[in-house]
Amino acid sequence: MKTQLLIPAAGMGQRLGAQGPKALTDLCGEPMLVRTLRAFSGLGLLPGAVVTIPGAYASEFRNVLASAFPGTPFSLIDGGAERQDSVENGLHALDADTDIVVIHDAARPFVAVASIHASIDAAIAYGAATVAIPCNDTILEAESDDFLCNTPDRSILWACQTPQTFRVDVIRKAHEIARREEFVSTDDATLVRRVGGAVKLVRGTPLNFKVTAPGDLALARCVIEGGLA
């Protein structure tokens, strides 16, 4: 089954304090997007990969990708106001004969190849899959005034990661319904589940964290400098 990679990279990284697109933030001498894409290079998923970007920075993205991956064709697509909009734009840009789409955050540079493989296999088998890890911490649910109101059973809680991998028809239908019903989610697997689709959870790793805040960026640099990734 033909598989294509989709990287949402349109965020401007306000929470990170970045001066420009978050995906181009320097990470020990390389843009974060480049480190993220390298995880997929051995799987043959870089040629034709769709990357959603802030349109005003198209030339910067083209230059970065051409320098890091010379001769590799990428499809750069304008993102939207929210991640969900960017993914939807990217889904419209997939090749007509693509069966499986692997959606991975540009800000998760340390994804394990085994997790990518497992998500693709699960999507082929079940239609949809997301990489996630079981929660080690006790999770507290708060009321609006920050008082504890519930403590969910930790044994059934997982922390969502990416990639989230889908049969193309499954995720396109989920996005179409979400847009029609004006439903917004921070991840794509939730869109599939809310319309009755089965989503297989695939085991990720703690290193597959998302670089969102300055502390995350510092941790990512420590991971690289310590030779952990």
Image: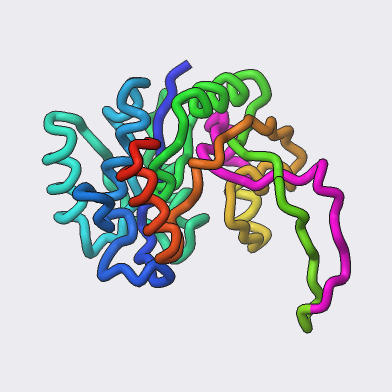
Pick the front one: 196 or 148: 148
Residue at image point 69% right, 30% down: 200
Q: Is residue 154 rendered magenta in the image?
A: yes
| Residue 78 higher or lower than 64, as above or below | below
Question: Residue 20's x, y, as percent?
Answer: 26, 67
Residue at image point 21% right, 47% down: 30
| Residue 127 higher or lower than 224, as above or below | above
Q: Residue furthest bottom?
A: 145
Residue 72 makes an appearance in the image: yes
14 vs 19, left or right, is: right
Q: Look at the image and name its color scheme.
A: rainbow
Question: Residue 4's x, y, as percent?
Answer: 40, 29
| Residue 185 higher or lower than 197, as above or below | below
Question: Residue 137's x, y, as percent?
Answer: 72, 52
104 vs 59, left or right, is: right
Pick the front one: 209 or 190: 209
Q: Is residue 146 rendered magenta in the image?
A: no
Which picture quadrant has residue 24? bottom left
Residue 88 makes an appearance in the image: no
Question: Residue 225's x, y, as percent?
Answer: 30, 45
First to last magenta residue range: 147-174
